[in-house]
Amino acid sequence: MKKTVLCPQCGKPYICSCGRAYSCWSNPTPTTDVVIYEPGKGVVIIRRANEPLGYALPGGFIEEGEQAEAAAVREMREETGLDVELTGLLGVYSRPHRDPRQHTLSVVFTGRPRDAAALSAGDDAAAAAFYPLDALPAPLVFDHARILKDFAEVLAGRRAVAPVETPGDR
C-alpha cells in the first residue's frame, strides 16, 4: 500500500523539490525463522533478549538483496551459533498482528544442525536450548506456538514440507 509520508512535527505531507508529496510503500517486512530439529533432543528455542520478551524460534529480518534461505542460515549462526542445513519450507506466516512491533511476513524453514553441540546463545538471544515438543518453555511469543504445532504435524506425517533452494541457487 502506498502512503504519503507526513512530517512528525506539523503533520503535513513532506513535499519534494518538484512539488509532489513524498510517498513510500507500506508493506510487511520480510523475516525468516527456522525450526531446528535434532531427534532425541527436540527443537531449538531461544529466550529473547529484546522486546517482546519470551521464548521464540530463532530468526530475524531478511536484508535487502539477500535470499530468504541465506538469511535463515545467517540468522541461525548469529542467534544460536549453529551451522544449519535447511531441510524444507514449512510455510509462510503473515497475519498482520503476528509481531506486535510491526507487520512481518515470515518464511519459515525446517533445518538440522550440522553439530548440535555448537549450540550457544548470541545476537538477540539471551539463551538457547533444545526442548522436546511436549515440554516447550512459556511464553512463546509471536505465532511460534502455531508454527511448532504445524511442525509437529510434519513429524507425525500429516503435513509435508516443500523443498528449498540452496542459498545462492539461481
Image (tube, helix red, strand yellow):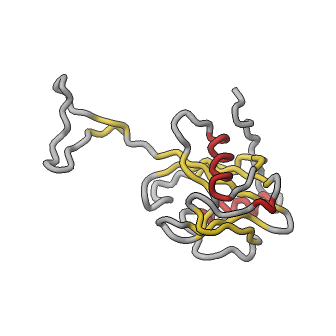
- Residue found 65% across the figure and 75% down from its top: 137
In this image, 73 relative to 4: left or right?
A: right
Q: In which quarter of the image is residue 24?
A: top left
Residue 112, percent across and down?
79, 54
Residue 167, percent across and down?
70, 36
Q: Nearer the viewer, residue 21 or 161?
A: 21
Q: Quadrant of residue 21?
A: top left
Q: How many marks?
A: 0
In this image, 40 relative to 80: left or right?
A: right
- Residue found 59% across the figure and 63% down from its top: 125
Residue 72, percent across and down?
65, 47
Residue 166 position (above or below residue 42): above
Single out the residue that lies furthest toward the right: 40
- Residue found 83% across the figure and 58% down from its top: 157
In this image, 148 relative to 28: left or right?
A: right
- Residue found 73% across the figure and 77% down from its top: 135
Residue 15 position (above or below residue 75): above
Q: Nearer the viewer, residue 82 or 45?
A: 82
